[in-house]
Image (tube, helix red, strand yellow):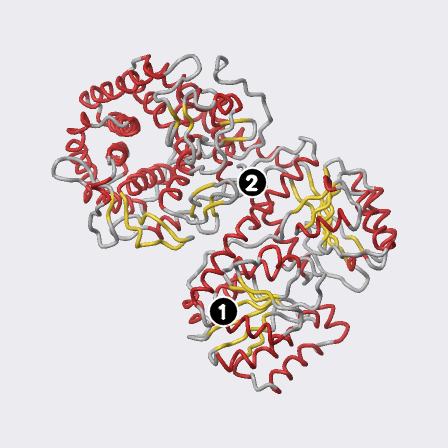
Amino acid sequence: MKNENNTAICASPLAIEKQIMKSKNKVHYLDSVAKLPEILFISSCTPRECGIATYSEDLIKALENKFNHSFKIEICPVESDNVKHTYSEEIKYILDTDKEEEFIKLASEINANEAIQMVMIQHEFGLFKNNEASFATFLESISKPIAIVFHTVLPNPDENFKFKVQQLSDASTYIIVMTHLSSKLLVNDYNIESNKIEVIPHGTHLVQHLDRNFLKEKYGFGQRKILSTFGLLSSGKSIETSLEALTEIVNENPEVLFLIIGKTHPTIVKEEGEVYRNKLEAQVISLGLEEHVRFINSFLPLQDLLEYLQLTDIYLFTSKNPNQTVSGTFAYAISCGCSIVSTPIPHVNEVLQGSGYNFDFENAPELATAVNKLLADDDLRNNNSLNGLHKMAPTSWENAAIAHAKLFEKMGNASLPLNYSLPEINLEHIKKLTTDFGIIQFSKLNHPDIDSGYTLDDNARALVAMCQYLELSNDTSAIHYILIYFNFIKFCLQPEGYFLNYVDEAEKFTKQNNSTNLADANGRAIWALGYLVHCGDLLPEEMVLEAEIILNRAIKSINKIYSTRAMAFIIKGLYYRSKRTKSNQDIELIKELANRLVQMYRHESDEEWHWFESYLTYANSILSEALLCAWLATGDIVYKDIAKLSFDFLLKLTFNENGIRVISNKTWLHKGANPAQLASNTPEIGGEQPIDVSYTILALSKFYSVFEDERYKHKMKNGMNWFLGNNHLNQIIYNPCTGGCFDGLEDTNVNLNQGAESTVSYLMARLTYENTFEKTAECFQIETQFYEEPFLKNG
C-alpha cells in the first residue's frame, strides 16, 4: 500500500484482510455477471427511426438500470431487404424478416444457447408482413418461454386475422398489451385466455419539471403560448386538422405559436419523399399562419425533446386512426406536465380524464374550442397538468421495468431472482430544498414550497444525513450544509434549554409550537447534536465545541421528557457523543432513560406482545435501536436482551416473504385489537412512510453490527428495495431523476410530492446501507435465496 506521496506504508492485518475480502467479492461479482441469465429482445431497434425502436431502447435502458445484476439483455434487431442499418459490435443476432432461412437459423441459435432463458418480441404486423407464416413457425419452434408485446390490437377481426393472432398467442407464454381495452379485445374478440395477458402501460420518462417560462426564454419563445405536437411525420398524424383549427385559435389568442416537432418518417420519405410536409407548409402559407407555426424538422435528442414538451402549454395529439392502441408521444407529453387536447384513441380514453379534452377525429372546430377554453383558464391548465402527472407516474420507465422484470421472474420459474440496482447517491434535491436558513419542509412535486416553512425535525434529520455523507464520502462540501442545519438547530433553542419546532418562511416561530407536543422534536435535536459531536474529527473545531455547549444546555431538561420516542432519540444522541467524549454524565443519563424504556416494556409485554407500548405507531424501530445503543454504552445485558426481543417482534410484523410493509399511519396496530391481523402479518395497506422504512434500515444496520446475523443484513436489502419498487404497488418511491423521495406509499398510488422528511429519510437509509456493506461489490453481488426462520418462534 502507498500513501498520497506514493511512499510504501504498512497496513494492519485487519486492513489487509478487508482488502482481500473486497477482491474476493469483486471476483465473485464479476463471475456472477458473466453467468447472468440472458433475455433476448427481438424488435426494431435504434438507429432505426420508428416508435417501436424508441420504445425498445427506453425499456431496455430502464431494465438495465434497475436490474443489471439480475439478467443480461441481448438484442436482435428486425430488418428487411429494404431496411438496413449498422449496429454496434455487441449485437450478436439480426433477423432479416424477408428471408425464411433467417427465421430457421435464429430459432436454432436460441434453442442451442443455454444462457438464453426467454425471448421477448415487440410485435407489429407491419414488421413481419412479408413473411407472416415463417414468423409463426419461428415462434412455434422456439423451446424457450416467449413474451410477445402487441403494440396494436384491432377490434372486430375477420376469421383470417383472428386466426393469425390466436396462432401467435398459442406459441407465446405471455402476451403484453398496453391498455385494458386491448386486454378486453383479446379476450372478447380473439378468445384468448385472460390469464396469459399482462397489461403494462407504455412507459414515460421521469423529468425534473423545469420552469416553463425559463424554458421558453431559453428557446427564444418569450411570452408566447405554446402548442406543440411531435413524432415522425406521416399523413396519419392529421396535423392538417390542427392547422385548420389554428386560424380560430389565433383569433382569440394571437400570442399562440404551434411547434410541429419531428422529421418525416423514413419509410414515408422512401416511398413518397416530403409530400406530406410540403402539403403542411403550403397550408400554413395559405392560411396566413407563418407567424404562428414553426417546423422543427429533426429527430431531437431525448433531453431536448423533453424540454420542448415542458415548455408546451397545450399538447395536441391528432390521429386519423381510431384503432391506434397507444401513443408514446401522448404519454411523453402528459408526463412533462402538458395539458392535452387529443383524439379519443384507447390510450387517451384510459388516462386523459381530468388532464385535458377529447375531440372527434378530424374535427377542427372541436379542437379549436377545446384549445381556446384551456388557454383562457390558467388554473384549469395547471390542474390538468397535475392530474396528468399523477396518472402517468405509475407508468414511468422505472415502473415499466419493474412490471416487466416481475413478469420475467414468473416466466423463469424462480430461476431468475430479481436484484434491484442501487442508484448513485444524489444530493441534488436536498440542496434544492436547502436555503441559507435551513431545509424547507414540503415540496409540490419536486419544487420546494417555501410557504410550508421549516421544522426542527427536518433540519435535525438533515444534519445527521449530511454528517453520514461526510463520513462516507469525505466530501468536505457537505460541511456547508451541516453548518446551515446546525445554525437552524441553534435558532430553535430557547433560553430555558428546550427547542421550538415550527418556523415560517419569514423565519418566525409559528403558533403551531403552542399547540403541538414538541418532545420528539427535542429528542431529534439532541440526536443530531450528539451525532455532530461524534463526527467531530471531520468538522471545524469551533462548530463541535458549540454543539457540545448547546447539547449540555438541552439535556438539563430531559427529566421532563417522557415521550417514548423522544427518550429513544436522546439515548442515540448521547450514545454517539459518548463514543467520542467518554462522558460519565452521558452514560448515567443513558441508563436513566433506558431504565424507563425497560420499565415500559415490562409493563406492556407478554408472551404474544413483545413491545414497549400497547400499540405500534410510527418510528417503532428507534425504540429497540436505542436500547441496543444503551447496551453498547453501558454493558448492561438487560438492554441488549430486550432490544433484541422487541426488534425481532417488530420485524416479524413488518417483514414477510415479499419484503417490508411498515405499520400504516392510517391505522396503528393495537395490542389485542385485531388478532387476525397480527397472525397474518398484514398491516393496513397504504399510509407507509419513507421515514419508517429508513429508521428500520438504520436499526437493522446497528443490530447486524452487534449480532452479525445475516438475516438482519438480508432485511436491509429488502428495506432498500422498498424504495426501489419492491412494495405492494411495485412502484418506485425514490426518484432517481431528481434525487428526491416521494412522500408516501398509499393503497392505490404514490404521493409524488418530494418533501424534506422523505428525501432525507431515503438518504439516511442509502448511506447506512452502503456503509454497512463497506462499499464493496457485496452491495450488488448475486445472492442465493435462503429460507428465513422466524425471529420469534413463540408468537
| Secondary structure type for disc 2 | loop
Residues at discs 1 and 2 in contact (Cβ within 8 Å): no
Name the residue nearer the viewer: 685 or 653: 685
The quadrant the N terminus occupies is top left
Query: Residue 612's spot in the image, x, y percent?
Result: 34, 20
Q: Amino acid at mark 1?
A: Leu
Q: Is residue 61 above or below residue 617?
A: below
Image location of residue 616, percent across then percent down: 39, 27
Residue 494 is at least partly visible in this image:
yes
Q: Position of residue 728 (x, y in %)?
A: 54, 37
Label number found at residue 99: none
Q: Which mark is residue 374?
A: 1
Between the C-alphas of marks 1 and 2, the distance is 34 Å
Q: Which amino acid does the dot numbered 2 rest on? A: Asn
Instruction: Tell me what residue is drawn at x 69 percent, y 46 percent.
Output: 74
Q: As drawn, is 110 to the left or to the right of 476?
A: right
First in sequence: mark 1 or mark 2? Answer: 1
Who is closer to the viewer here, 198 or 515? 515
Residue at (19%, 20%) from the top-left corner? 584
Q: Is residue 227 left or right of residue 102?
A: left
Task: Report the residue that reaches farthest toward the left.
Answer: 495
Above or below, 725 relative to 135: above
- Point out the residue furthest to the front here: 673
* Secondary structure of residue under mark 1: helix
Q: Look at mark 2 in the image and give the residue it sits on.
A: 730
Along the viewing direction, whichever of 757 and 484 lies nearer the viewer: 757
Q: What crowding class fits label 1: few (fewer than 14 Cα within 10 Å), some (14-19), or many (20 or more)?
A: many
Task: Report x, y in % for residue 47.
Answer: 67, 60
